[in-house]
């Protein structure tokens, strides 16, 4: 049975642990203790970052990780059958300006059915749903066969190193569900993203003689407009209906700008860091090629940049895209369980963000979907929250789906 009171209590406790990416040791220790107490077989290991980062398929990192703590819990019926993998990341992004929150980010609050706090929906609510579902399957396991694995991983927010470590450690399954916030729809396709830096040149001059110089900031503004045109072309060309329905499945943004060394000097250099979308028809390398081509074409039409081209570097986390069939038994079975539990339909949809789903699909060959509580619209935002009804409904759906799959 799903226990809503216990689920809320455990979610609020997890939120109170500030497991910012690269600082996941405490939450992993506590989750390992919880799962061991619940009677599951628990494997704890640290991914070898030297070995993993040397792998040509390593997805990259953007944050220093002193260690890479991974927890995998196993529920084994002792009888041969399918293996189900649930995967959830324990790391969260920094809370940002505390003045934008109604209450402290790591002091969970409850209001009108929602639990608030950093990580509430992305994705500690989903982790609690998965743990509750594991309990429910355990309590009814006498007539089941096969096993369930719950992988709790660090490092998702900056590339996916934790799930990559799980795969390279040899864990595999017949199907995988990641309870990321999907508003209880079933994500069967998602875009990806790369992080980039534009090193934009200019020519310095005294402010009183600004016409003698060339502003790197003005050059960046020109390039931003070119990237907007490129974004429009790439999104208008999308033919996968699940992605096209999003409206802007592959956004491009400049999120950070550095430049200038004196208020009265024309800028001679600007660094602009941003995000570029990976379409479902390509990988991160293909997206990087698109980005470089768009910048090169824009530079060729500019009187200064044609002679002083912009340097483009791609770095950090590499989020490839992934997609599966909406009529695969995994989403079909999950949708049937959702309807049985909730009385409503769960749509098979696309998502515009990168996720660990692509690692299990591409690196491990495991059919994978995302299905979880809360809306991605509140992820990474101030006053992030998740409806507790979503958390318990997700747990009930996962439990029913797993029970039916393991009863065959």
Image: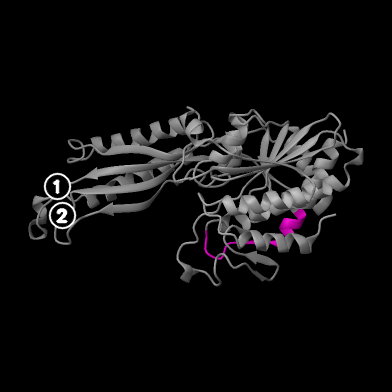
* In the image: residue 48, left or right of residue 264: right
The region drawn magenta spans 381-393
* In the image: residue 376, left or right of residue 158: right
Q: Nearer the viewer, residue 105 or 170?
A: 170
Q: Residue shown at 52%/31% (left/top)?
A: 281
The location of residue 148, given as percent across then percent down, is: 77, 39
Q: Residue shown at 81%/45% (left/top)?
A: 337
Q: Residue shown at 18%/49% (left/top)?
A: 268
Q: Examine the structure image and report whether residue 99 is included in the region drawn in magenta.
A: no
- CA neighbours of label 1 inside 10 A, class few (<14), some (14 to 19), many (20+): some
Give me the disc on residue 357.
Answer: none
The residue that mark 2 highlights is: 266
Q: Residue shown at 77%/44% (left/top)?
A: 40
- Find numbered disc 1 in the image and state the secondary structure of the residue it sits on: loop
Please identify the quadrant where the N terminus is shown.
Answer: bottom right
Q: Nearer the viewer, residue 319 or 50?
A: 50
**Image quadrant where residue 326 sits:** top right
Give me the disc on residue 203.
Answer: 1
Q: Nearer the viewer, residue 281 or 393?
A: 393
Q: Nearer the viewer, residue 373 or 162?
A: 162
44 up-or-down from 391: above or below: above
Q: Is residue 333 visible?
A: yes
- CA neighbours of label 2 inside 10 A, class few (<14), some (14 to 19), many (20+): many
The location of residue 366, given as percent across then percent down, is: 67, 31
337 up-or-down from 377: above or below: above
């Amino acid at each position: 049975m799903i226990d809503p009171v216990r689920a809320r209590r455990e979610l609020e406790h997890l939120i109170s642990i500030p497991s910012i990416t690269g600082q996941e040791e405490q939450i992993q220790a506590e989750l390992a203790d919880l799962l061991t107490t619940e009677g599951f077989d628990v494997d704890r290991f640290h991914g070898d970052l030297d070995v993993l980062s040397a792998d040509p398929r390593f997805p990259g990192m953007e944050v220093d990780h002193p260690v890479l703590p991974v927890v995998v819990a196993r529920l084994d019926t002792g009888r041969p059958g399918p293996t189900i993998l649930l995967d959830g990341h324990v790391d969260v992004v920094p809370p940002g300006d505390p003045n934008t929150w109604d209450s402290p980010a790591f002091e969970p609050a409850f209001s009108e059915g929602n639990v608030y706090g950093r990580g509430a929906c992305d994705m500690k609510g989903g982790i609690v749903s998965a743990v509750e579902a594991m309990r429910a399957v355990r309590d009814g396991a006498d007539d089941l066969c096969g096993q369930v694995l719950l992988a709790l991983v660090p490092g998702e927010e900056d590339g996916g190193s934790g799930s990559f470590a799980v795969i390279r450690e040899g864990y595999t399954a017949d199907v995988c569900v990641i309870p990321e916030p999907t508003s209880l729809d079933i994500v069967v396709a998602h875009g990806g993203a790369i992080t980039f830096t534009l090193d934009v040149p200019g020519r310095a001059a005294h402010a009183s003689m600004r016409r003698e110089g060339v502003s790197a900031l003005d050059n960046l503004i020109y390039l931003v407009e070119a990237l907007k045109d490129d974004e429009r072309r790439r999104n208008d060309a999308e033919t996968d209906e699940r992605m096209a329905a999003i409206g802007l499945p592959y956004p491009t943004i400049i999120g950070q700008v550095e430049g200038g060394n004196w208020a009265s000097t024309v800028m001679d250099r600007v660094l602009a860091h941003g995000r570029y979308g990976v379409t479902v028809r390509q990988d991160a390398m293909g997206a990087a090629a698109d980005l470089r081509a768009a910048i090169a074409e824009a530079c060729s039409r500019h009187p200064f940049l044609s002679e002083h081209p912009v340097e483009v570097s791609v770095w950090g986390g590499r989020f490839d895209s992934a997609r599966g069939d909406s009529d695969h038994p995994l989403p079909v079975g999950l949708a049937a369980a959702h309807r049985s539990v909730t009385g409503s339909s769960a749509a098979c949809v696309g998502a515009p963000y990168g996720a660990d789903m692509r690692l299990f699909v591409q690196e491990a060959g495991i059919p994978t979907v995302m299905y979880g509580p809360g809306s991605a619209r509140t992820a990474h935002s101030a006053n992030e929250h998740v409806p507790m009804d979503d958390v318990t409904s997700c747990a009930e759906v996962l439990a029913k789906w797993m029970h039916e799959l393991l009863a065959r």
